[in-house]
Amino acid sequence: MERKKVTPQEILAKKDRGEKIIRTICYDYPMALLADRAGVDSILVGDSMGMVISGLSGTVPVTMEEMIYHCKAVTRAVKYALVVGDMPFGTYESSIPEAIRNACRIMKEGGVDAVKLEGGKEFAPTIKAIADAGIPMVGHIGLTPQTAARLGGYKAQGKDAVTAIKLLEDARALQEAGVFMITVECIPYKLARIMSEELTIAVTGCGAGPYVDGQALNMYDILGLFDRFLPKHAKRYTNLAQEIVTTMQTYKREVERGIFPTEENSFTISDEELEVALKGL
C-alpha cells in the first residue's frame, strides 16, 4: 500500500490503535532522506544540531536562522514523515506575540508540519496561543536541554515525589493547551507510563522507558556518527563513524600508492583530437 503523508491526526490514531510511534532526530537532507525511506513516522529538526552538527557545548546558542536553514534542508528531503521544527532558546520566552511570530517563521520559512517548544505549565498559555494561531504543537518536558543549567545539568528528572507531581501537572497542562504530542525526556519509566495511560495525546519518550506511545532517538546516536558521548538512554545500532574513518584511510592509501584514480575513473580524448589541440598551442 502506498504511504501517505503523516499528519498529527495519524499520530493520534496510532496511539489509539496501540501502535508505536517512531520518531528520530536529524538535521540535514541526506539523513532526512534516509530516515524517510526507512519509514519513520516523524522527524524532529532539533536544536541539538548545535552540538551534533556545529560542535557547540549545548543548545542555547542556536539561532532562529540556523533552525530555519536546517528545517528547509530536512523538509526538502521528506515526503512522508511528519517534520517538527524546534523553537530555539530565546524565541518564545519573552512574550506570546513574539512566540507566535517565531513559530510562524519556522512553519512558513522552514516548511515544517509542526513546532516544538520546551517547558511545562508555565508555557501553557504560550502554547495555547500558538496552537490557536493554527500551528500544530508538540511539547517537551522532563530534561529540557535549553534550561539544563537550572535543572542541575543533563540528568534525569522526576525522581522524587515533588518533581514527579510537577511533571504530571506539566503534561496535563500541555494537553489542555492543545499539543497533540509531547516528548518526555529522561524521566522514570513508571512515571512516563502513567502519563501515556492517562493522556489522550501521544507521549513519546527519549529516555523514558518502554511503556510510552513511541520513541524519539537521535539518528546520529543510532548510527554511531556522534561519538563525543552516548547518552544512557540511547542505543548505538552500528558504528558508522569508525567505518567512515576506515574508508577514508583506504582512500588516502590508494591515492598515495597510485591505485586511485585509474584511467577508468578519468576522462579521455582521442590521439587525433589531442594532436589537433596541441598544434593549436
Image (spheres, rainbow, N blue to C red):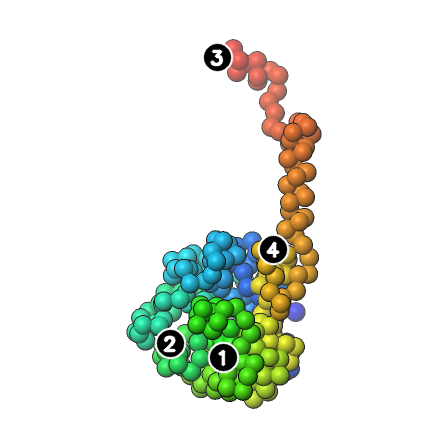
Outermost residue, bottom side: 198
Earlier along the polypeptide chain: callout 1 or callout 3? 1
Q: Secondary structure at mark 2?
A: helix
In the image, taking residue 214 as reference, residue 259 lies left or right, namely right
Earlier along the polypeptide chain: callout 3 or callout 4? 4
Q: Callout 4 environment at 10 Å: few (<14), some (14 to 19), or many (20+)?
A: some
Decide which of 268, 69 is in the foreground and name it: 69
Q: Nearer the viewer, mark 4 or mark 2?
A: 4
Earlier along the polypeptide chain: callout 2 or callout 1? 2
Q: How far, Cα to Cα, is label 2 from label 3?
A: 68 Å
Horizontal and vertical percent position of residue 83: 50, 66
Earlier along the polypeptide chain: callout 2 or callout 3? 2
Q: Residue at x 45, y 62 (%)?
A: 59
Q: How far, Cα to Cα, is label 4 from label 1?
A: 33 Å
Q: Is residue 66 above or below residue 181?
A: above
Q: How far, Cα to Cα, is label 4 from label 2?
A: 36 Å
Earlier along the polypeptide chain: callout 4 or callout 2? 2
Q: Quadrant of the N terminus?
A: bottom right
Q: Residue at x 68, y 44 (%)?
A: 246
The three-letter amino acid code for the residue at tag 3 is Leu
Horizontal and vertical percent position of residue 201: 53, 82
> Any mark on residue 252, and which?
none
Q: What residue would you read off at disc 2?
A: 130
Q: What residue would you read off at disc 1?
A: 180
Q: Secondary structure at mark 3?
A: loop
Earlier along the polypeptide chain: callout 4 or callout 1? 1
Proximity of marks 1 and 3: CB atoms separated by less than 8 Å? no
The three-letter amino acid code for the residue at tag 4 is Asp
Q: What residue would you read off at disc 3?
A: 281
Q: How far, Cα to Cα, is label 2 from label 1?
A: 13 Å
Q: What residue would you read off at disc 4?
A: 227
